[in-house]
Amino acid sequence: MTPDPVTIAAMIILIFPMGYFTLASPAFLLVKLDIQPVAQLLRGLFNAHFLVMRVAGVIGTVAFLVEGRPLIAIGVGLITALAIWGRRSFMQRMDDQLSARDAGDAEAPRRLRRLHWVGMLCNAVLLVALVASIPYAAPLT
């Protein structure tokens, strides 16, 4: 008895970028965000994560629809929608804090750090939900 290979592939495609982000983003907790190259690198990490999740989410949603698993496809579609529509808002907030930091706002790095924590927490919650759904998405057949 083996799970459906298309479902497993779709789950891996979704879990890989989320797992990478989960491992890469805490490194920025060890450095000060008032250093411009560090903050720009953090911004780039978040931007890349949102873009990769768009692609992975669309692939996952289509794969689950083709496999005839509409409930799982809806869940993955919600993650994809969050990546698509949440990116604009999140990146705008990050850019606002970077601009405020460049303008001399002493509290901007603290707000940027809070935004960093929120992004990591949201990714972690979605990753846990996705991993917890594996037995339902890929039951043994």
Image: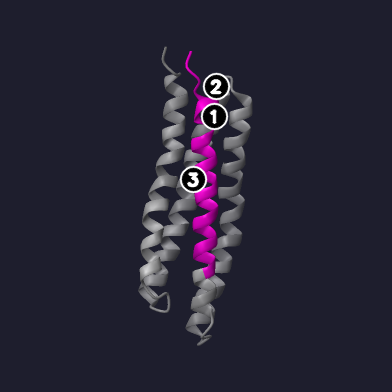
Question: What residue span does the magenta drawing correspond to?
Answer: 114-141
Quadrant (top left/top right/bottom left/bottom right) for the N terminus:
top left
Q: Which residue is drawn at 51% across and 43% down?
A: 128
Spot occupied by residue 72 in the image (x, y as percentages of width and height) = 59, 29
Q: What element carries label 3?
A: helix
| Mark with earlier residue (3, 2) | 3
Q: Locate residue 75 relative to residue 25 in the image: left or right.
A: right
Above/below status of 99 relative to 124: below
Q: Of the numbered discs in the image, which one, if any, rests on residue 53?
A: 3
**Are circles 1 and 3 on residues that touch, CB within 8 Å?**
no
Q: In this view, does 92 lie above or below 85?
A: below
Q: Which residue, given by chain and number where applicable, does mark 1 sit on?
A: 62
- Identify residue for label 2: 66
Query: Is 72 located above or below residue 121 in the figure?
Result: above
Q: Position of residue 20 (x, y in %)?
A: 38, 48
In the image, 84 versus 70, the foreground residue is 70
Secondary element under disc 1, as helix, strand or loop, is helix
Q: Are marks 1 and 2 in contact (CB under 8 Å)?
A: yes
Secondary structure category for the residue under label 2 = helix
Hey, what amino acid is under mark 1? Val
78 lies left or right of 50: right
- Residue 92's quadrant in the figure? bottom right
The reply to whether the magenta stretch includes residue 79 is: no
